[in-house]
Amino acid sequence: MNESIQFGSRTIDFRLEYSDRKSLGITVTPELEVLVRAPFGATIEKIKEKIIKKAPWILKQQSFFFSFHPKVLQRKYISGETHLYFGKQYRLQISIDKEESVKLRGKFIEVITFDKTRAKDLLNDWYLQHAQTKFYLIAAPLIDKFKKYKVMPSSIVLQDMPTRWGSCTPKGKIILNPELIKAPKGCIEYVIIHELCHLIHLDHTQKFFDLQTKEMKDWEKWKMKLEKLLA
């Protein structure tokens, strides 16, 4: 059932499930949903009391996950518009010709097409191709570093994810958002390391953050850059 509590000026919505357990369990998902599992017989009043006590932690978790939510900008895909690649700004330059191509030329991303309405698709395909190549090159040495923990991803795949930069499945598959190709290398390394840490610690426990800090001491800097750059 769906319920909510008021914490100061914030409303926290949560989904309540009853199960055969002894204590209350609260989970915040990467999609910012709050799942509460309560023992049979627990009253809604007592449940809400406990959730209010945990409200600062819930909001902190939601804020953390929100930083992984890509911000979708409305683009017109016309000449002069700026687009990011590896953390740098480039101006889009669209030219008409029979042969189609996309190339970096100085401070420009040059799109050549026989129809200007195709610029968006051509540019997105170019981003995807570069993401496929660059992500694997960046990931390879990081994966080697994590072999000391006796873990290795089963695969690395690219997938459009409107609410996440990356994810890790229980079977060890790491999924990366192709939009990351627009961020600096350090941001991409941060997301990959974050997901590699999940091969060892599934949840965002203190042990998870300790491991992440051990493998990337300045991860918070790159996390902030990712938030600001693509916001």
Image (cartoon, rainbow, N blue to C red):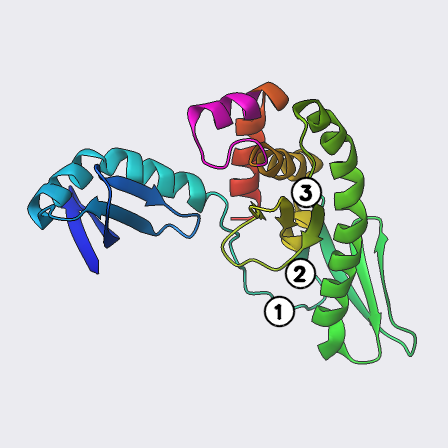
Q: Which of marks 3 and 1 is in front?
A: 3
Identify which residue, 83 or 19, lies in the foreground: 19
Residue lying furthest front in this view?
A: 20
Looking at the rendered structure, the secondary structure element under dot 3 is: loop
Give how far apart the Cα atoms at labels 2 and 3 are. Answer: 16 Å
Looking at the rendered structure, the secondary structure element under dot 1 is: loop
In the image, which disc is placed on residue 81? 2
Which quarter of the rendered picture does the N terminus lie within? bottom left
The local crowd at label 3, few if under 14, some if 14 to 19, many if 20 or more residues have their Cα within 10 Å, is some
Left or right: residue 108 compared with residue 179: right
What segment carries the magenta color?
A: 199-213
Query: What x and y, as percent, mark residue 142?
Result: 72, 31
Q: Residue at x 42, y 52 (%)?
A: 31
**Figure disc tally:** 3
Q: Residue 230 in magenta? A: no
The local crowd at label 1, few if under 14, some if 14 to 19, many if 20 or more residues have their Cα within 10 Å, is few
Residue underneath mark 1 = 76
Q: What residue type is labelled 3?
A: Gly
Q: Do the residues labelled 1 and 2 touch (CB within 8 Å)?
A: yes
Picture layout, residue 3 above or below residue 65: below
Q: Which residue is drawn at 49% across and 26% down?
A: 209
Give how far apart the Cα atoms at labels 3 and 1 are. Answer: 20 Å
Looking at the rendered structure, the secondary structure element under dot 2 is: loop
